[in-house]
Amino acid sequence: MAVRRVVPNVQSEAALESQEFYGLLGFEEVMNHGWIMTLASPSSPAAQISFMASDKTAPVTPDMSVEVDDVDAAYAAMRESGAEILHPLQDEEWGVRRFFVRDPNGLVINVLGHR
């Protein structure tokens, strides 16, 4: 299994202000679903940051997203380890397959793969 990118998720009610602020550093909007907006660096597209008020389909808002090349293998590894799964593995309408797991620091990690 390989990690493709890691994106901090900032819980925020100030998406527009954040977009303007991070735009000063060169970030541009690459995704906006209304409840989550992702900004990326045009020169380094894997350098991203997301802002969300709350997650649309999950009971908690994740602190970080980790995209992997095999989300099913990641899910199996986390379950086998006894890690706390907060949101089960499922396909989302916006084209990702994902689950949430709590890390040893108490952070909520959104582990995903694109379909």
Image (spheres, rainbow, N blue to C red):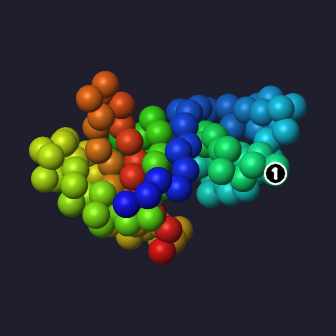
Residue name at image x 68 percent, y 57 percent:
31
Q: Is residue 33 above or below residue 52?
A: below
Q: Which residue does the image show at 38% across and 66% down from the upper left?
A: 70
Classify residue 82 as left or right of residue 114: left
Q: Please identify the quadrant where the N terminus is shown.
A: bottom left
Among all residues in the image, which is located at the extreme bottom? 115
Residue name at image x 83 percent, y 32 percent: 25
Asked whether 79 or 59 is in front, the reply is 79
| Residue 20 in view here | no
Image coords of residue 32 (percent x, y)? 67, 55
- Residue at the image position 30 percent from the left and 66 percent from the top: 72
Count of numbered badges drawn on the protein: 1
Q: Is residue 51 above or below residue 79?
A: above
Mark 1 lies on a secondary structure that is: loop
Task: Specify the amino acid type for callout 1.
Answer: Pro
Number of other residues with Cα within 10 Å of mark 1, as a class: few under 14, some 14 to 19, many 20 or more:
some
Q: Nearer the viewer, residue 4 or 32?
A: 4
Image coords of residue 37 (percent x, y): 65, 48
> Horizontally, is 7 left or right of 111 in the view?
right
Point out residue 103 in the picture as x, y percentages from the top left corner. 30, 34
The residue carrying mark 1 is 42
* Residue 21 in sight from this viewpoint: yes
